[in-house]
Amino acid sequence: MGRYVIRRLLQMIPVFIGATLLIFLMVHVMGDPIAGLCGERQCDPATESRLRQEFGLDRPVWQQYMTYMGHVFSGDFGTAFNGQKVIELMASAFPVTLRLTLVAVAFELVVGVVLGVLTGLRRGRPVDTSVLLLTLVVIAVPTFVTGLLAQLVFGVTWRIVQPSVSYTAPLGELILPGLVLASVSLAYVTRLTRTSVAENARSDYVRTAVAKGLPRHRVITRHLLRNSLIPVVTFIGTDIGALMGGAIVTERIFNIHGVGFQLYQGILRQNTQTVVGFVTVLVIVFLLANLLVDLVYAVLDPRIRYA
Amino acid sequence: MTIIDNTTADVPSGPLLEVRDLHVEFHTRDGVAKAVNGVNYSVSAGETLAVLGESGSGKSVTAQAVMGILDMPPGRIPRGEIFFRGQDMLKMSNEERRLIRGQKIAMIFQDALSSLNPVLSVGYQLGEMFRVHLGLSKKEAKARSIELMDRVRIPAARERVNDYPHQFSGGMRQRIMIAMALALEPDLIIADEPTTALDVTVQAQVMDLLAELQREYHMGLILITHDLGVVADVADKIAVMYAGRIVETAPVHELYKRPAHPYTRGLLDSIPRLDQKGQELYAIKGLPPNLTRIPAGCAFNPRCPAAQDICRTEIPALLSVTERDGTELPGRGSACHFWKETIHG
């Protein structure tokens, strides 16, 4: 098991370098960050060259990348053009998004898996058909529609929740945004679990478990569920990364000052340091989430552990 | 002559298991597949019944009905009775049947790799029998599991109890299946093609082990197979199935010597023999029937070399087989209009 973990950790290094380099180059192609600083007018050449020198923009791209990486590893993500430390932005944004993601993942795990098992065991029955139809609707409707609709209905018409999340974003206020953020993935988790459960329910080892005279609940929880959850765990794990970086729409709708909000601002203002910094951290989060998936995977399936 | 159930013939104390006029059908998109169409057989303690037939003959479906592990729906049992120690299991509640499974009747499946749960250790899967049925603690169950693994001669059982199914060889996995079936010392074991997935050399070892344990615990054994070679040494009696019916019953050695049904004869003739080296191997022509459209009359008639007009219209009943002079042959029966010609031919 130890060797397995080390191997997985080493595999993360090239992925990390490749991904960050790609982002760095992409942002570089996006445009000249100095050009937009002085508004409509052309910048004063002297100021421009001073800024370029100060931010190291006069050096070749690969040097810029190396310098940046060096700083990142010493915990310095640079300074945004407005003078704010990027690390400070992160310190305020990431905890908020992490809370939001946790709420979303909790919904996926609990609601998605329960619905999936329920429908997987009752394939073709009314429960199955209605849940299936519902997931189709959820997948088909874009998040900004479900988000705005949920905000309007629960926040404005019924006044059950605050339509806009306050700056500190306490957990209670994140339940509705979390559900909106999870909705599409939740539908996928439901379908994935359903297929997996239905498939495994016909498997030989479940038949053996029944032939052993085990009670039905034991057949389902000990034998069927554990095997069925393997693909679901993979999906949810990779989804953690996607949820953290992809909450832009949800965070905008509910006015949550998280990662998505900061990224959006950063891109809008061509704030290179902010964008690259945030994305670099997201890459790390994504890699760690994947590592976690692989570890859980190995716990769930001994065939991988001993491979 | 009357319709007989020859398999009950010489049992004084009453059989352990008795299947009477069992019918099983499956509702499929193509119509109703009649998998089992009136099967009668019985097994006593210490006795081995071999059920022989091609795939689709209904031999496994009958066993699953006995075990109570048929998928219903799409499966359905429109008619029949399955008596275990005199009680009709088809009239029992789900819970009553569950308590019989594993404790009184156990089953061994064909492919041990897919039949064992890949993510649970063999010790867990064996121990589960003791924990669920006997309420033993984890520790006690583990000790009993090691004993069991020793019993089926798995080397280094103590070290291997925490291993997973994929870490064992095919023969060892099947031994684990046997151990699991044996755990609570059931009265009856149903083995559904227990050696089909194994190497020929391992086949004999596993079969011998099964036969030995059966003798030791005085269990009834139903051995389902399509392999005539497997049954010869272990079985007491054979029931040959075709298209959901038993077409011939006989004590094991008599069947080999003098088959009383053209289908059985065809099966025996298609075994490769050394003295026929170089000659073309015999094969029964045609294919087993589609179970949604079983031919009228005798189901075997389209493939039978001796088929007459009556075979296409009338279903032959399983009748007792006699010598030329009329003396009864105990335990023998044939569902062929022309059994006389076939056996005495």
Image (cartoon, coloured by chain):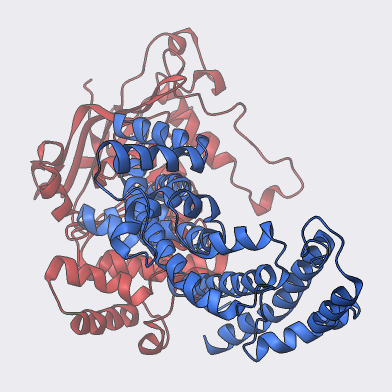
Residue for point 69% across, 71% down: A276
Q: Residue furthest bottom?
A: A74
Q: Quick one: quadrant of the C terminus of chain A? A: bottom right
Q: Give residue B150's quadrant in the image.
A: bottom left
Front residue (pair A42, B322): A42
Q: Give residue A10's quadrant in the image.
A: bottom right
- Image height of B316 relative to A67, above or below: above
- Residue B333 pos. (x, y %): 32, 32
In the displayed structure image, the side of residue B182 where residue B108 appears, left or right:
right
Let me know if residue A13 appears in the view. yes
In the displayed structure image, the side of residue A114 where residue A185 appears, left or right:
right
- Image height of B255 relative to B109, above or below: above
Residue for point 17% across, 52% down: B98
Q: Which chain is depicted blue?
A: A
- Residue A30 pos. (x, y %): 80, 59
All told, the count of numbered labels is 0
Front residue (pair A194, B142): A194
- Residue A230 pos. (x, y %): 46, 61
Residue for point 91% across, 78% down: A60
Let me know if residue B239 appears in the view. no
- Residue B63 pos. (x, y %): 31, 44
Residue for point 31% across, 58% down: A173
Front residue (pair B341, A82): A82
What color is chain B drawn in?
red
- Image height of B302 relative to B124, above or below: above
Front residue (pair A76, B23): A76
